[in-house]
């Protein structure tokens, strides 16, 4: 009887002191950051833009506003599409110059 109790205490001790896993649960990994998007946000409100491309989610654009709030922008917005085209053209020109 004492051997079983000792084994149980040893197993609980090992489980308690084992390092936690760094992996995220599947439900959190597959969740998209942007669940809804904003279509009509003036560019003057935006401080910076972030772009996220993940395998399970569509292309996502996160705008950090001057008020430090973050909102998701619709990537199909006309001014955002023009902004991305200009950024890609600038990138191509800089690579051609090298």
Image: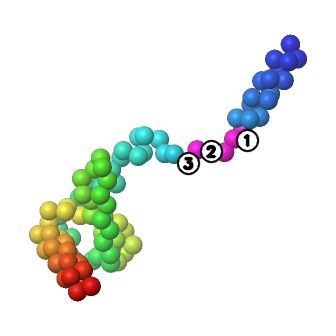
In the rendered structure, which segment of residues is drawn in magenta? 16-21
Query: Label 2: few (<14), some or many (≥20) within 10 Å?
Result: few
Q: Residue furthest bottom?
A: 97
Q: CA distance from mark 3 to mark 2?
A: 6 Å
Residues under numbered marks 2 and 1 in contact, where contact means CB atoms less than 8 Å apart: no
| Label 3: which secondary element | loop
What count of labels does the image hold?
Answer: 3
- Residue 20: give its label: 2
Q: CA distance from mark 2 to mark 1?
A: 9 Å
Q: Position of residue 26 (x, y in %)?
A: 42, 40
Q: Residue furthest left?
A: 78
Splitting the image into 4 quarters, where does residue 81 fall? bottom left
In the image, what residue occupies the spot 17% across and 78% down? Answer: 89
Residues under numbered marks 3 and 2 in contact, where contact means CB atoms less than 8 Å apart: yes
Judging by the rendered image, the residue that carries numbered circle 3 is 22
- Residue 17: give its label: 1
Q: Does residue 17 belong to the magenta stretch?
A: yes
């Amino acid at each position: 009887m004492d051997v079983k109790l000792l084994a149980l205490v040893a197993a609980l001790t090992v489980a308690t002191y084992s390092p936690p896993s760094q992996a995220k649960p599947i439900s959190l990994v597959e969740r998209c950051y942007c669940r809804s998007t904003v279509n009509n946000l003036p560019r003057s409100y935006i401080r910076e833009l972030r772009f996220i491309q993940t395998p399970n989610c569509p292309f996502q654009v996160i705008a950090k506003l001057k008020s430090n709030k973050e909102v998701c922008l619709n990537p199909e917005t006309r001014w955002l599409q023009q902004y991305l085209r200009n950024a890609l053209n600038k990138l191509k020109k800089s690579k051609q110059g090298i």
